[in-house]
Amino acid sequence: MATKTPDQISEDLLRPLSGFSPRYLISLAILLIIVTAAGYAFGAQIYSGLGLAGINRPVFWAFYITNFVFWIGLSHAGTLISAILRLCNATWRRPVTRCAEVITVFALSIGAMFPVIHLGRPWLAFWLFPYPSERGIWPNIRSPLLWDFFAINTYLIGSVTFLLLPIIPDLALIRDTATGTRQRIYRVLALGWRGTSKQWHRLETAMHIMAIAIIPVAVSVHSIVSWDFAMAPVPMWHSTIFAPYFVAGAIFSGIAALIIAMACLRQFLHLEDYLLPIHFENLGKLLFVMSLLWFYFVFSERLTGWYGNESAEMTVFWLTQRGAFSPLFWTMVFCNFIILFPFLAIKKLRTITGVVIASVAVVVGMWLERFLIIVPSLAHKYLAYSWGSYRPTWTEITITVGTFAAMCALYMIFAKIVPIISVWELKAGLHPVQQASHALPQPDEVRAE
Amino acid sequence: MARQWGMAIDLDRCTGCEACVVACHAENNISTVGEKEAARSRAKHWIRVERYYEGDFPDVKVKFMPVLCQQCGTAPCEPVCPTFASYHTEEGLNGQVYNRCIGTRYCANACPYNVRFFNFFNPIWDKPLNLQLNPDVSVREVGVMEKCTFCVQRIKAGEIQAQAEKREVRDGEITPACVQSCPTQAMVFGDLNDPDSQVSRLARSSRGTKLLAEVGTNPKVTYLQQDSWHGDENA
């Protein structure tokens, strides 16, 4: 990378923004067809009723809430990782941060849709807004679902701001090179960025404030998601360890998602010179640490539950450990823990391919983890007479697959609008001294002021 | 002091005839969901008779336990509802306001007794059941939760009647449909704040237990039974 000049960087990173290859258009079309199918499934569900999903009594939450927790978890990729790396001033972060922040915004938007998709009467979801309504009641502040509502909205606003702030100088860069309608659009988007020292100073201050502020917000979001479960007296839900366990799991799956996204970008946008093996290796190490932490939480939770030997808890415990859900449980342990040892602990195998294989396993494993937290506990609650089981229907499967397609489509579209790697940050990293001179006001700008 | 409605169910008297289940369906406009949906575990029975078997064949003994909403004093279903659809009434009932419900089903997950029911589809009644709907009870639409109300419409009617006649509600005057229909009089309903009511006396009985008392829900239904289900038959 040291051989690249600033002009080359601009050229390389802005190239994906111009023109569409047939491969791009075909894949986008396929993804959008899947998203449309999911939209149709949701429409049918609104028309007929939630009975189209596989949920029943007593398994009232299943795929949709699994997806909700999963996507909110993935959203911790970005903002949290990028904020921590920014604050630690890890210089290798520069090409990584924006890919990560984009994941946050889209995964969070998708995740936040699931509580609405899963509602019995989704058209009344707005009743969670605290507004003086003609119905004469406020939302119930004691409900963890209301905490969710506020936490997720705060996080969404925060992470959108966090994503958009460092994009502004890049939008200005595109504006300066583009022509015609494109230039007019980017002129609006660039918000009058001229690169004056005052503007740079304000941007850096704002970034710093956001990086600090977003970390407690991110932690609170997944803690509150965990409390959706931990606050109910359901066997294996009612646990004090849930908040940190969920936050760790969220960062874990988030890093995995980031690695997969980076590998795709590297492959399809030919960013081999920017997303280097060192990035994958560093993130792979981070993934491995999170895997150990995840296992530590699962082990502590299971061990204390086992020693507590409370009958309702033990029913669910054995159901996952060696009962009907045990194949899923052991697959989860394999994907989230065992498979990471060869691919991440052995230096020789910690290649880009190895790290990506491990990441795919983690994404699968973490989805299973959420499913295994939700469904077995509900299926075997206290009274044996009303135990049940669960099988997903096509409606749920279509909507689930549709959200993965939506994530890919949004990512592809975004990468056509904004350079997916921060151009100005890379340049700043290239020649730290040059950044200082770049920050100085240009003579004509001084005159303009 | 406000009344606290409660119930006592004598398991030693219950024959498992399910008259209470039928009466409840008729009184509360509970739609039948059909064979297919029932097989998918979506049947709605605000009261159900649970069957438990004891001993090994051929020496098997069956025990029946009617389970309905326990109208918990500290109900796990109430705080989790984001829209106050489930809330605590002054008379100690776990109210369920269908029109407020947006269908998160969180209350049903929090309920340790699994006595909350979800309308997976709009309700339909096979003919001629559609002609016997109770005008005192609202019909619930798709997407909302419903559950046993202790026949709140009968409670309100009894209270209004007593008020009109300028007297207190008499013990045993108000009976939910299940209590009224029980052929062995295994179920008793009344005010727990009246120490002389029949239900209060039964609730204090040494034979009384609460279902899943260890969860800490303070249920208002007391189950009466011999010291142990394995107890001496002649005791």
Image (cartoon, coloured by chain):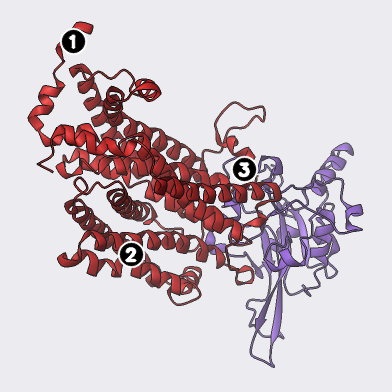
Q: Residue at x 62, y 32 (%)?
A: A137
Q: Residues within 10 Å of mark 1 (few under 14, many from 20)?
A: few
Quadrant showing the N terminus of chain B: top right
Residue A229 placement, left or right of A57: left
For mark 3, name the chain. A
Asked if the residue under mark 1 is in contact with the one under mark 2, i.e. CB atoms within 8 Å, the reply is: no
Hey, which quadrant is residue A206 in on the image? top left
For mark 1, name the chain. A
Point out residue A291 in the picture as x, y percentages from the top left corner: 28, 61
- Residue bearing mark 3: A122
The chain coloured red carries which letter? A
| Name of the residue lying farthest toward the bottom | B58
Dot 2 amino acid type: Asn
- Of residues B193 and A395, the one nearer the viewer is A395
Q: Is residue A86 above or below residue A245?
A: above
| Name of the residue lying farthest toward the left | A433
Residue A359 placement, left or right of A32: left
Asked if the residue under mark 3 is in contact with the one under mark 1, i.e. CB atoms within 8 Å, the reply is: no
Q: Residue at x 25, y 18 (%)?
A: A194
- SS type, badge 1: helix
Task: Mark yes or no: residue A431 visible.
Answer: yes
- Of residues A77 and A430, the one nearer the viewer is A430
Point out residue B87 in the picture as x, y percentages from the top left corner: 63, 44
Q: Residue at x 81, y 59 (%)?
A: B25
State the separation of the CA atoms marked 1 and 3: 55 Å
Dot 1 amino acid type: Asp
Asked if the residue under mark 3 is in contact with the one under mark 2, i.e. CB atoms within 8 Å, the reply is: no
- Residue bearing mark 1: A444
In front: label 1 or label 3: 1
